């Protein structure tokens, strides 16, 4: 398959040029993956991220307006079907981070509730709530 004919979708490797307001181009190569395999540090961009959503369906040669920080536009340089697959380790790492984040949010919600609740039998003590075990 020729790179110019492939539309960006999960499972694609994409070479981009990020164009700033002065016209300077910075190269970025990524693989669009399912969210559970995302690991941007290793070039794996989740399909539901803002950048991926802008790219999905586009083809090589397209210049897309994209106003984010100092970026003015994105040029899709090339699109290929990815030859690599996300490792199971990356997927497990992502799941572990997500699970830890959910626990932290739940704990914060419990502290906020305990701090604001007042009942006729007494108040909750936020300091009595168990701490997260993986911190």
Image (cartoon, rainbow, N blue to C red):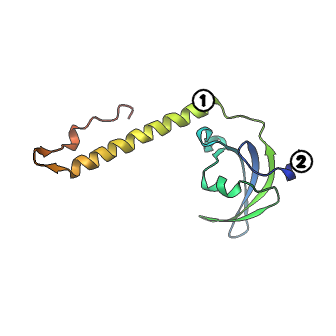
Residue at figure coordinates x 34%, y 35% from the top left: 132
Which of the two residues, 98 or 15, is positioned nearer the viewer here? 98
Give how far across and how far down residue 126 sits, in percent. Answer: 22, 43
Mark 1 or mark 2, earlier in chain: 2
Instruction: Tell me the tag on residue 100.
Output: none
Mark 1 or mark 2, whichever is nearer to me: 2
- Secondary structure under tag 1 reads helix
Above or below residue 123? Residue 60 is below
Residue assigned mark 1: 89
Which class describes the residues within 10 Å of circle 2: few (<14), some (14-19), or many (20+)?
A: few
Q: Which residue is painted at 44% across and 37% down in the image? A: 100
Q: Position of residue 21 (x, y in %)?
A: 68, 70
Task: Give the residue at mark 2.
Answer: 2
Whether tag 1 and tag 2 are in contact, CB under 8 A, the answer is: no
Q: Quadrant of residue 74?
A: bottom right
Element carrying mark 2: loop
Q: Is residue 123 left or right of residue 69?
A: left
Q: Residue furthest left?
A: 121
* Residue 118 picture location, percent across and down: 16, 50
Please tell me whether residue 85 is drawn above or below residue 70 in the rendered image.
above
- The percent position of residue 114, horizontal first and vertical second, equals 23, 46
**Quarter where residue 88 is shown:** top right
Residue 125 in the figure: left or right of residue 15:
left
Q: Residue furthest right?
A: 2
- Real-space CA distance between mark 1 and mark 2, rounded to the nearest whole angstrom: 31 Å
Tally of numbered discs? 2
**What residue is shown at x 77% (from left), y 40% (from top)?**
82
> Which of the 4 quarters of the picture holds residue 102?
top left
| 92, above or below 104, in the image | above
């Amino acid at each position: 398959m020729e790179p110019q004919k492939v539309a960006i979708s999960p499972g694609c490797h994409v070479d981009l040029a990020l164009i700033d307001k002065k016209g300077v181009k910075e190269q970025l190569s990524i693989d669009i993956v399912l969210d559970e395999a995302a690991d941007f540090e290793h070039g794996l961009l989740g399909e539901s991220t803002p950048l991926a959503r802008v790219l999905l369906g586009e083809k090589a040669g397209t210049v897309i307006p994209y106003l984010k920080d100092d970026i003015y536009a994105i040029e899709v340089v090339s699109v290929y079907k990815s030859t690599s697959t996300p490792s199971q380790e990356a997927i497990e790492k992502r799941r572990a981070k997500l699970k830890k984040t959910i626990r932290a949010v739940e704990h914060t919600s419990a502290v906020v509730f305990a701090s604001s609740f007042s009942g006729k039998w007494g108040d909750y003590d936020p300091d009595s709530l168990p701490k997260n075990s993986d911190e």
